[in-house]
Image (spheres, coloured by chain):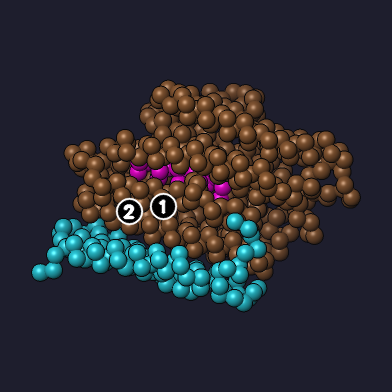
Chain colours: A cyan, B brown
Amino acid sequence: MIPLHWYLWLGSIVFCIGIFGFLAKRNIIIMFLSIELMLNGVNISLVALSHYMQDLRGEILVFFIIAVAAAEAAIGLAIVVSLFRNRTSPHVDEIRELKG
Amino acid sequence: MNFTDIHTLMPEIVMAVLALAVLLSELVIRRKETVGLLAIVSVAVTAYFIPTSFGTVFNGMFISDGYSVFFKFIFFTCLILTVLISSRYLEIERSSHGEYYALLMFATLGMMLMASAGDLIVLYLGLELMALSLYVLTGFIRHEYRSNEASLKYFLLGAFSSAILLYGIMMIYAQTGTTDINTISSVLTEKKATVSLLLSVIFLLVAFSFKIALAPFHMWTPDVYEGAPTSITAFMSVGPKAAGFAVLGRVFLVGLYPLQINWIPLLIGLSILTMAVGNILAIQQRSVKRMLAYSSIAHAGYAVIGIIAGGNEGVSAMMNYLLIYMFMNIGAFSILILMRSEDFLGESLDDFKGLAKTHPLTAGLMLLFMFSLTGIPPTAGFIGKFYLFKAAVGAGYTWLAIVTVIFSAISAYFYLRVVIYMYMHEPEGEAVSLSGSPSLGLALLISALLVLFIGIYPSPFISFARIVTG
């Protein structure tokens, strides 16, 4: 049987790839995908933990995360579409009317 | 579970049903102000179910106690004031759609769930419901690029911070075997503080800092607050922030209380940094809206002191501060909305030049709110800060109270600069034409009266907060 910590490592590696993608890439769509990767890293860990601890909470949380992620993707893409109607560029560096 | 548990959940159920009803009513009601009125009535109906809702149900997943009820009171007032200041403003921005009010109600529902969450799963769901509604509301003026951009920035950083929150929840779950906040607390009392536990605390702290805009996780705030519709900026800087504080208090002062020694230094660091960043960067802003964004960062830094001080005293001081901050901040944003007209932005400091000559009443109200935000007696802002300092000194953080006083002295510079522009400069060019409406006037009246009332006679509010936390 595969030990628990392998899954946890896998989850944390996927999560870190997501963080790296979010911080390093400048394309909005890739940044979305990176956030999904982060969420799925969490999902892998939660499902593994839930299975090994014989506890349902983790799996319940995973279902909620998947549902929320779907809603989030819908809203995110809607925001991008409305942004593109006014200006057509997928690069965040060009979105800088408001100076941070 | 038995069916009587429903009583505790009744306010949330009613709110959800009525929010859907408001969403549908938009199809048949032509006048959008009526939809706004429906939203206000819904809040009143929901509030009617609050007194019978006390209890802990669904195996501790949902808690309705004095603490959550106080926060729900803040959210309801915030929603009503926001609806009042919105209707005319949305017409000026040519974005008068009924969904606006439904989304505001969904955001409020999310905040109510956050305040009542006894479990990290419920907390996450409430937080997402609130955040998703707010992303849409931020980009509500679809034809305006600034609004789109603010919405996108808010969305990207909000989703990022939610992912970090989930990782923190996952780590807590891995180490305690539960997501129930009370059980986490009892499991942690028997555990030693290991590196991985501290790491999970840091993950949670970072995620919450994003939500309540503590430096160095505040970067999104000025942009989002500036780009969002002004009414939504007013809403966002009060309601969701208070909800963030509600969960911060619940998770850190209940769930992670056994690790208090470890997270207090972190929170103190964040608080001081937040006050420094908020107050110092606000000085160089020429836009009043952006200045108020930085000021809201600084005020989050003050309110965190209540959580650092902890205990009945600290928590009730924080709650009072958030309540008072709501009235003065929404008041200040209402003035900005009043200044906005079809072809005039009215956000720049220069637009306030000589306002006292042309519109003495508006200038007087702005003066009141600016004094209150600075913390000058006899306004409510002073009372809020006074009790926070008292709680900090009582918990043995006298030096922190002194640091806060210094920063709030710095803040006087940029708040009072608005007053100087209004009273000591001559008006330039054409006189500003105000776009008032009865509802906006009502919102201003409520905020101004309460700012003065709490400033002069604070004891009912103070004892209310003490009773509900005690």
Marks 2/1 in contact by CB < 8 Å: the verdict is: yes
When the figure is inspected, residue B340 is found, relative to residue B366, above or below; the finding is: below
Q: Position of residue B374 (x, y in %)?
A: 63, 33
When the figure is inspected, residue B254 is found, relative to residue B1, above or below; the finding is: above
Q: Is residue B367 left or right of residue A33?
A: right
Q: Which mark is residue B207?
A: 1
Q: Quadrant of the C terminus of chain B?
A: top left
Q: Position of residue A17 (x, y in %)?
A: 36, 68
Mark 2 residue type: Gly
**Residue at the (75%, 36%) spot, across then down:** B419
Q: Mark 1 — on which chain does it sit?
A: B
**Residue at the (43%, 57%) spot, across then down:** B161
Q: Quadrant of residue B258?
A: top left
**Residue underneath mark 2:** B168
Q: Which residue reaches farthest right? A: B429
Q: Position of residue B420 (x, y in %)?
A: 77, 36
Q: Which residue reaches farthest left? A: A1
Q: Position of residue B52 (x, y in %)?
A: 39, 40
Magenta residues, start to end: B236-252
Q: Which mark is residue B167?
A: none
Q: Mark 2 — on which chain does it sit?
A: B
Taking the image as drawn, is residue A5 in sight?
Answer: yes
Q: Quadrant of residue B247?
A: top left
Disc 1 on helix, strand or loop? helix
